[in-house]
Image: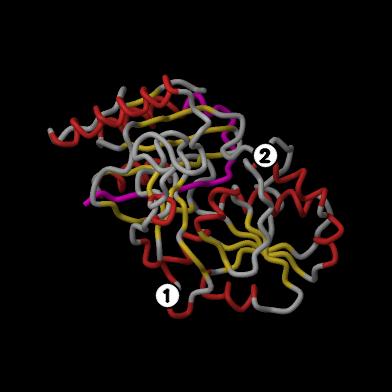
Amino acid sequence: MIQVAALYRFAHFPDPAALREPLLDLCVAEGIKGTLLLATEGINGTIAGPPDGIDRVLAYILTLPDCADLEVKFSTAETMPFHRLKVRLKREIVTMGEAVDPIGSVGTYVAPADWNTLIEQPGTLVIDTRNDYEVRVGSFAGAVDPRTASFSDFPAWFRAHRDEIERAERVAMFCTGGIRCEKATALLKAEGIADVRHLRGGILKYLEEVPADESRWHGECFVFDERVALGHGLTVGTHQLCRGCRMPVGPEDRASALYEEGVSCPACHGTRDDAARAGYAERHRQAMLAEARGETHVGATYTKDSS
């Protein structure tokens, strides 16, 4: 069994570069793959590997400054959901592009068990802070979709809809694992929105803890690894990745005449020239040959660059 740990913590890291090598070396030694981002505002990422190795990496991260209360969501995978390990330095652990302080002031955490009551309460404006392609895979009924292409678009969307948001009695925001909606609450608080709340642990914690027959979630939850999307109980869903545009593709889209496995999907069909399509097809052919040999068709196993 492969254990997957999605984690983040807003923390004060005066010198994140000094933390990178020890963390990278430990992950390599423990057979861990995935991505970890380090910045002066903390740590964020998802990693996968043997349960004992995950435990040792998390035990180390807990010793880092301000990380004793690290937020971690666990799930499992039958096969390794990442091709390589990346430990990178960033300006932000989740890119908003705004100078907000998610350590000093954020919204009120709401436990998954209390989320249904909150979002069904009259006067609550529910906002999905994820990207548009994630929302298409699944969301809470009645949630506002900002239709953003990236999280850095969220501040502009908020300001364009400020009047609507201010009219709400309270704002409830959510995202995949909790980090984006936590940073979004910091923005709204800084902009003077008083009653702002967010789902603790994000959608993943909700799907893990709330029984399906009590759930207000519709569809699946997109995740940034080879499992693509998860359902209730964090079981692997029905979506796959288009290898041409890296967008999630559901069963209906895969039945389309515009879908070609490993090459294109209805969203990107017609946007690539013949040379690009031939390259995708050859890459897919090589991946299938590697799979038949019991191998993984990837490049480097870990990345130390800071880009």
Please tell me how many numbered marks the rendered image carries: 2
At which x and y percent is residue 246?
Answer: 45, 38
Q: Picture quarter containing residue 185? A: bottom right
As displayed, is residue 281 above or below residue 56? above
The residue tagged 2 is: 152
At which x and y percent is residue 24?
Answer: 37, 29
User: How does the figure colour the protein chain or chains?
Assistant: secondary structure
> Residue 264 versus residue 62: which sits nearer the camera?
264
What residue is drawn where x is 43% and y is 23%? 274
At which x and y percent is residue 40?
Answer: 60, 33
Q: Picture quarter containing residue 97? A: top right
* The stretch drawn in magenta includes residue 8: yes
Disc 1 marks a residue whose amino acid type is Ala
SS of the residue under disc 2? helix
Report the span colored magenta. 1-18
Disc 2 marks a residue whose amino acid type is Ser
Mark-to-mark CA distance, 1 and 2: 32 Å
Q: Earlier in the sequence, mark 1 or mark 2?
A: 2
The residue tagged 1 is: 212
> Left of 145 or right of it: where is 38?
left
> Residue 143 versus residue 15: which sits nearer the camera?
143
At which x and y percent is residue 197?
Answer: 67, 64
* The stretch drawn in magenta includes residue 228: no
